[in-house]
Image (cartoon, coloured by chain):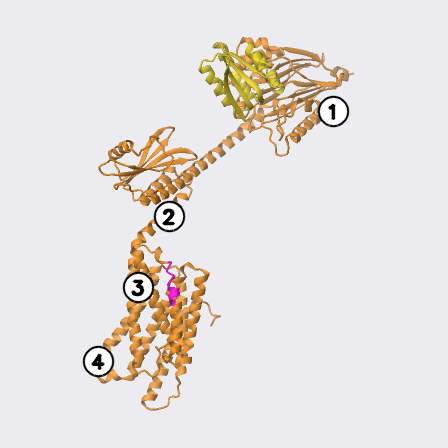
Chain colours: A orange, B yellow
Amino acid sequence: MFKLPSIHIGKLSMLLSILVWLALLFVDLVRIFGMINTLESGISSEITWILEILFFFTLYFFYSHTIEKNKQKDFLNLIWRAATTGIFATVVALLIELFYYSLGESKLADEPFLKNFFYHVNFALTTIFLISSALLWKHLILYQKTKQVVKQWQAFEFALLVAMFFVFFNKNNLDYSFIFGMVILLVISIVLSGNLKWIPYLNFKEKWKSLLFLFLILICTGFLFRRFLVYSNAEVYQVNLTDNLFLVALFIFIFLYALFSFLVTLFNLPTSSVFEQKLTEAINFQRLSQSIKPDENEEQVLDILMDSCMSASYADGAWLEIISHGSEVASMQRRFLDQPTQEELISAIEQSSDFSKTQYPLEPQTIRLNHPKFESALILPLEVNNSKIGKMILVKEVKDGFNKEMISIIETFSRQACIAVENHRLLNQAIKNERYQEELKIAQRVQKALLPTKLDHPESFEICAYSNAADEVGGDYYDTYKLDEDRYVLIMGDVSGKGTSAAFHMSQMKGIFHSLIQLNLSPAEFMIRANSALSKCLERNHFITASIFLINIQEQKICHARAGHVPTLFYQTSENKSEFMLVDGLGLGILRNRKYENHVQEKTFHYSTGDILVLITDGIVEAKNQKGQQFGFERIRSLVEIHKDKTPKEIQNLLIDSLHAFVGGNGMIDDDYSMMVVKFLTPQDKIKP
Amino acid sequence: MLRLEKTKESSYDIISLHGEVDASNSVELDEVIKELIDSGSKMILVDGSKLEYISSAGLGVFMSYLEDFQDQDIRFKISNLSPKVFEVFKILGLDQLIPIYSTKSEALAN
């Protein structure tokens, strides 16, 4: 049987139970036939009992199977099912009684076969009612399963099982052992009947309905039990089926649980609205906490907030004031109030002695109003990310209408709503930021293109350069320019600050430098012109520092001017030492008039083979390690002196590696930094034979 | 971290800078100077004895008021800069435009 698919178990057990019942009926009728005709039928009462127990089992299987299948049904449905079965059993029993009543004193009324048949029908229907109800109660009891309750139920089931077979032991006598068993089952039933956790989940209407159903079940149980008592006293029935401990225990259990449920539901009625309120609050809370999608707006959250707060406090009216665009107060979401009333209320609030003059109180504030209709108000500030976004005003028609619990739940609502609004704003911000990131990436690409990909230089000197921005874009700039066969210009510039503003100024600088370079100016003149051009386009508190080198490879001469830029390191082979060349020169854009001319100087010097120039920006010098020390000039100088024989590229890499090592593994260099290294080789005219 | 202290000593408004001036806090320095100018102060001394570092953004603040100092005839001085900070002023060339003294008394006397 167990190998069959589970779909058939229900039908099979039903079929079996019907067959068993028919067998039971047959056996008992045969026995009566034997007795009437004083024949020994040879059927012992044990056979009846076995069939009876089989009947219980098959019914139990059938119901536990069908009820299990409809698990999702609600409590009311379960109770209704029990009630209908009970009513059916009762109505049938009543009809049978009516039938006998109508028969009166006729012969048929004493017919033992018919009587026994009806007895069996009643027995079957009552058993069906009892077993199905017990299983329905099981569902209610185990609604909130805990280990303890499950164990209690298992103990009850075990006790019932024992009670089923008890009949073999006491032969259907109402002796002390019977009473003992009944008491045990009664105690377990009472313990189980304490599990009524499903009741609070019924709403007000459902509670009324369940009261009605439970009442019907109680009536039916009582009536059927009375019928059983009548049967057990009658002598006509040869084998007593109904003085069974199992059935009596079930009667007790069904009745007790129905009674407990009835009473608890009844006493729960007055407070059910409170429970419903709490449930609504929980649901509202959940609605508020669900973050809004980016394409939805904040108003929806505020809408839910208003509804939740109003229902939590039974408010008669409310409105919301939201600060939009700075300080402008937009009144929105009026509930159950028209504009004139709202204005009246605003002035009433302002006139109230409870009203603190601050526009946005820190905490919810209850206010007594002097208004013909509304007598109390609650002002609730709304705060997102530490800034006030507005306030909500709830009004009630009764005096002191807001108690502590209401205020605290409203506060919680508003906090939750504000978090939702904040999340919404953050999400929007994040999306916007992502777009900006994309834009910045483009800017980065464009800016990279502003730096030269190929550096102009003759064979007589080697050159390399490197630039890195602290942010996506930066304000450092370097370039080379070939004036003619013998003359080359190196230039390095640094806009004060970093990031986007520096990057814009850097592009202006490049434009200006590029046009000025072609004018064949002396370095000092170049700076003066650059200053006057940049003065017109730089922001007031921004400046640019620059270094320019005009290299004449024919004469092995360099002319240099410095406009506030970090001094350039010059290594001289002849002296075997290096120095930073601090020529006087004011940064560009600091003096935005002709006086600048007095603040820039030129220096001309000669170089020879093996000499090195290292142009840097202040990002390198000022790079800090974890201890707050700066990389400084000395490290650069000693590194260059040690590695003077290496190629510019090698020197540059060494300097950058050393800089990173100094700053530390995770340390970030907080400024743009750039470098250009030039090494002079054998002069050109000497290479050529 | 930057802490600004405003005091008055023999007709000079003295701004003492503690810590570092960088892009993140140069606005505070800017506000203090602007306040003094707006209040009609004619003599301002920046005491840099506790100034550990100044970035180009910080220098930009001083620089942006150079014209105002000149137009409104305000005497603006800096004193007690550590060698490292002074070097920053010198590299940019601001030492040519703002009188920088090694001690406060020297600055107040001149």
- Relative to A583, A326 lies left or right: left
Q: Which residue is mark 4?
A: A103
Marks 1 and 3: CB-CB under 8 Å? no
- The residue drawn where x is 37% and y is 28% is A327
Decide which of tag 4 and tag 3 comes sooner along the chain: 4
- Residue A466 vertical position relative to residue B75 in the rendered view, above or below: below
- Kindly report the distance in space between the C-alpha atoms of the residues bearing marks 4 and 2: 62 Å
The amino acid pointed to by label 3 is Leu
Q: Residues within 10 Å of mark 1 (few under 14, many from 20)?
A: few
Marks 4 and 1: CB-CB under 8 Å? no
Q: Residues within 10 Å of mark 4 (few under 14, many from 20)?
A: few
- Residue A649 vertical position relative to residue A141 in the rendered view, above or below: above
- Relative to A274, B32 lies left or right: right
Q: Residues within 10 Å of mark 3 (few under 14, many from 20)?
A: many
- Residue A353 vertical position relative to residue B79 in the rendered view, above or below: below
Q: Which residue is mark 2?
A: A283
Decide which of tag 2 and tag 3 comes sooner along the chain: 3
- The residue drawn where x is 36% and y is 47% is A281
Q: Which residue is mark 1?
A: A642
Magenta span: A189-197
